Amino acid sequence: MDFSLKKCNRDRLNALPDELICQILSLLPTKDAAVASLSSRKMGSAFTHMTALDFDDSPISYCASNHPLFVDCFQLFKTFVNNVLQAFKSPHLSSFRIGFGGDLNISQLHFHYSFSGCGAACFPDVESTLLNAWIGFLLNRDGLREIDLRIHVRIPEELPSALFACQTLEVLKLDTNLDFELISSMTSFLLPNLKVLQLRSILIPDDDFVSRLLSSCPSLEELYINCWWKYGNSVTISSPSLQELTLIFNRGDEYSGIWTIDTPNLQRFKYGDNLALRYSIPSMRDLVEASIHVSDCLDTPDQSFDSVLSLVRAVSNVQRLNLSVSCVEVLDREEMKNELPVFHNLRLMKLGHGGACKWDIVLLEFLKRSPLLETLGFPLGFVPSPVFIPLGDGYVDDSHAELERQVFRTNQEMPPCCKFYLKRIYIKRCWGTERKVELIGFLLKIALVL
């Protein structure tokens, strides 16, 4: 048999149907699709009828003082985008993505966007008329389902409010320093089919904005907010359709007032912020995964304890739980033994390790209240905490360190999970003081099915 490769003179790519070529080009970044379109007339025609456009110039820095040539690169990027949009012939567009301006550090934001590094000059100078023209182009297309804008500019102006009145939209991702004042003043929004909403780097100008926005999104399933909240005195997140919720804020040393979260069908919950004065959160009965990271505490230990405890109670139906160091340390009180809820469904628990934690209280209590726990993790390991000054053996006073040793060395009532379910314990790293060795030995002793 002749196994030699035979030369094929047929152009298989151009032999494909026009609709399939359009789909193939739509899967590529637009700059790569533009290169491919030069290969033949048929490819060039398909390029002007793609169903998705993806412009990304974000790896380029636009710092005029350090890299003046990069400014010229952005001018080429603007010309490329303009040329593609002018040549586009199809009335249909399902997805539009554009990214430029580098990364904006959310931790450096304040009410008037003070930028890190060498300042606002690092970002490109883009005329508002050009941005409005680009956004207006995509909103005038039929069948638009996804918009992903990552836009950081030197002089932020208003984000067009028409973005929040697109009835066909299913995914909206905004990572931008453009101004939201005009949008926040809207009395209502029109996003009946929106399923995914992501807001990053944005200054949310008033407390009612998100609650009004959610009331206009009856189909929303995923909400991600990583922003600076201008006030945060009284915030409400309410949605019966929401399944995944991520709330991450950076307030410096400020804390918010009252947080109300009413999401009865939530499955995944991630929260990172300074503690609020009060949380009002009905039980989340379908919750699968929760991660709680709090930073600055409140004025008194009692306030902080009550606040963290209300968060933990709200997620007590969870299957996988991750608590930060601050959460664990705030809960590390005798009152915890009477206040901590039972985690009937918990299978995996991750606890942040703080040097000042009294593990005979906080760890034992969590184990006792988690009857089906299978995996216990310490993702930060057992390492010194830079926040606390060592006292005695580890980071607790000598008297309690001795009490902790006695608890670890005597036969305590074994938590039910340790008898039948706890099969895996992982510690990322360990700073091997005698106290840590005692704790590890205790875990090995009580985990009978490890």
Image (cartoon, helix red, strand yellow):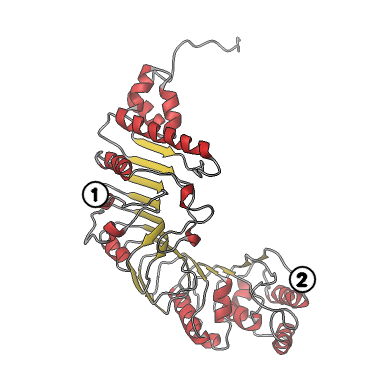
Which residue does the numbered mark 2 point to in the structure image?
432
Q: In the rendered view, does 107 fall on the left or right side of 25?
A: right
Q: Is residue 173 visible from the viewing direction of this image?
A: yes
Residue 395 to residue 284: above or below:
below
Q: Position of residue 78 (x, y in %)?
A: 39, 35
Q: Position of residue 247 (x, y in %)?
A: 43, 64
Which residue does the numbered mark 1 point to in the structure image?
167
* Residue in view at x 49 percent, y 83 percent: 299
- Give the Cα distance between marks 2 and 1: 59 Å
Q: Position of residue 215 (x, y in %)?
A: 26, 63
Quarter placement of the C terminus: bottom right
User: Of label 2 and label 1, which has the lower sequence position?
Assistant: 1
Q: Which amino acid does label 1 sit on?
A: Gln
Residue 66 to residue 244: above or below:
above
Q: Is residue 217 visible from the viewing direction of this image?
A: no
* Residue in view at x 42 percent, y 63 percent: 228
Q: In the rendered view, does 47 fall on the left or right side of 161?
A: right
